[in-house]
Image (tube, rainbow, N blue to C red):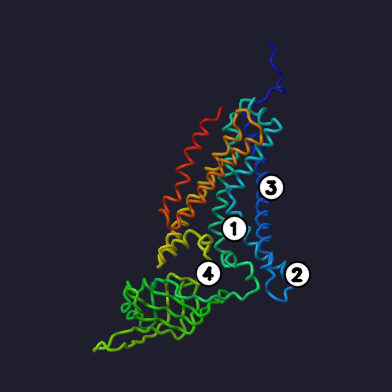
Amino acid sequence: MKSEPEHYRFDLTVLPKILDRYVAREFLQSYLIAILVVLSLRVILDLFVNLDEFAESKNQGAWAVISNIIRYYTPRLFEYFRDFAGTNIILAAAFSLARMMRQNELTAVLASGVSLKRVIAPIVFLGFLLNLVMVADQELILPRLADRLVLKHDEMEQSREVSVWLLPDSIQKLGDQTASDLNRKIPADIRQEALLSATRYEPSARKITGFLVLLRLEGKAVGRITADQADWDPLKQLWVLQNGKYFSFQKSQDHSELEAEVLPVRYYQSGITADYLWLQRNSNYKSYMSYFEITHLLRRGLKPAERAEAVSERHFRFTDPIINMVMLLLGLPMLVSRERRNTKTAIFLAILGAGGCFVTTFTCKLLGGGMINPLLAAWIPIIVFLPLSVIALDGLKT
């Protein structure tokens, strides 16, 4: 029997490589379109609602308003990218696979003997990489933009100064020539109940004017630390006080009056850093902090509700990327199933499944701020939807 000419032979081992590149290209093109559309809609909707706030300051021309809008939304693009990372991935997967189905490309690939799981493998891999990009955005970029992200719409032209009133603090170390005396005179239980106030804090100069720390024991004032000015030392991670003084309230021998012992204080080190003083003015500031910054925040005295929010935020730093992958794995089987359904129905079912996971995650984040255990809240979406995604993937007909 005459053998087939060499140039008519087709090596099936080449097909998966070609398919990987093609599916990856289609997915990335759809992803770029999805992220452009979603982020643009997010900016436009917010601008539509808050446009009047950008022009509240008097004597502002059109160019000043436009400049404020650009300066406000530019750093927020990184925030919106994080918030919609999972949504953009599932949308890109839906539209890229839908286009392949509509043009019968998926049918041709399956007819060549390639399994459905092999078809979606490049999308799963790229989804994983994009989640790593989201993690880098959260941990490396957003903390550096936090001082701009906490600004409100009408604050772009205002002087960046803030007053601080009785902010819970935990003293770590005091220092000057009498450092040993100071640290011995203020026991650990008093250090944990400190309250910090500042007449004015200037984040650009990292300087506090009117520095005051109220020392308490079981809710009663037992002393205070004052200074005309406090400057942040980024190398030593402490405040350098100018004319700093420690006042200790003590009962006289007949217990009839209070006497104040005064000692000089040069350095003040606590859980409150220069960046935190500016960020804490915004109730959403924890979402702009890195994992290590949140861990550092938890080491100092926080109110129970604020501590629960911080713990919940830290747990979700681990689970958010996993939840995004679960949404993708839950939606993909609905998109490439061999069951007879039109493209619109497939996309609807995929988005519906991923949307259920998204809503559950959002609800758990709200409840994890104090209503339920933060650890449980962070893992509930994974516990519920990961088994469903595994079952859906396992049920794919090859």
Q: Which amino acid does label 1 sit on?
A: Glu
In this view, the mark in front (2 or 3):
2
Q: Is mark 4 on a helix, strand or loop?
A: loop
Q: Is mark 1 on a helix, strand or loop?
A: helix
The label number, if any, that marks residue 33 in the structure image:
3
In this view, the mark in front (1 or 4):
4
Task: Find out whether the residues at labels 2 and 3 contact each other: C-beta distance under 8 Å.
Answer: no
The label number, if any, that marks residue 207 in the structure image:
none
Q: What residue type is labelled 4?
A: Arg
Q: Which amino acid does label 3 sit on?
A: Ile
Q: Give me the C-alpha separation between circle 4 and circle 2.
A: 29 Å
In this view, the mark in front (3 or 4):
4
Task: From the image, tell me which residue sits under label 1.
Answer: 79
**Position of the N terminus by quadrant:** top right
Mark 3 vs mark 4: which is more N-terminal?
3
Mark 1 vs mark 4: which is more N-terminal?
1
The picture quadrant where one finds residue 272 is bottom left
Task: From the image, tell me which residue sits under label 2.
Answer: 62
Mark 1 vs mark 3: which is more N-terminal?
3
Task: Find out whether the residues at labels 1 and 3 contact each other: C-beta distance under 8 Å.
Answer: no
Q: Is mark 3 on a helix, strand or loop?
A: helix
Left or right: where does residue 379 sit relative to residue 85?
left
Q: Residue 236, percent across and down?
A: 46, 73
